[in-house]
Amino acid sequence: MNIMLTDFWNVVNSSGGAEKVLCRMANELVDRGHEVTVVCSDPKSGNLFFIYRIK
């Protein structure tokens, strides 16, 4: 199944709870065999603080 997760807050280099939950949810869905796309509306570019695995 293809799944898209969205976050309308700042996530680049942010280490808050919402960002952590977003990455953990994406990772768990990937581990279960789903294709996951994360879309963020952060005006900054860069990496997420938490690890988002892509398989």
Image (cartoon, helix red, strand yellow):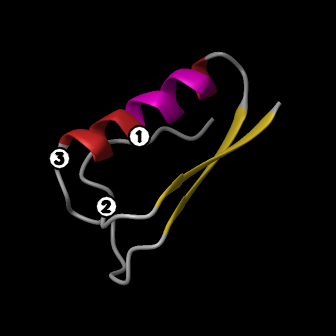
Determine whether the residue tagged by mark 3 lies in a helix, strand or loop.
loop
Which residue does the image show at 37% across and 83% down from the upper left? 43
Query: Residue 33 or 25: which is nearer the viewer?
Result: 25
User: Seen in the image, is 1 located left or right of residue 16?
Assistant: right
Distance, label 2 to label 1, CA atoms, is 9 Å
User: Seen in the image, is 9 located left or right of residue 32?
Assistant: left
Question: Which residue is under mark 3?
Answer: 16
Is the stretch drawn in magenta largely helix, strand or loop? helix
What residue span does the magenta drawing correspond to? Answer: 23-29
- Label 2 is placed on what type of residue? Val
Comes first in the chain, label 2 or label 1: 2
Badge 3: residue crowd in 10 Å (few <14, some 14–19, many ≥20): few
Comes first in the chain, label 1 or label 3: 3
Task: Judge whether residue 25 is colored magenta.
Answer: yes
**Residue 49 picture location, percent across and down:** 24, 52
Task: Judge whether residue 45 is colored magenta.
Answer: no
- 16 lies above or below 46: above
In the picture, the disc for residue 41 is none
Query: Residue 48 or 55: which is nearer the viewer?
Result: 48
Badge 1: residue crowd in 10 Å (few <14, some 14–19, many ≥20): some
Which residue does the image show at 52% across and 35% down from the upper left? 26
- 28 lies above or below 50: above
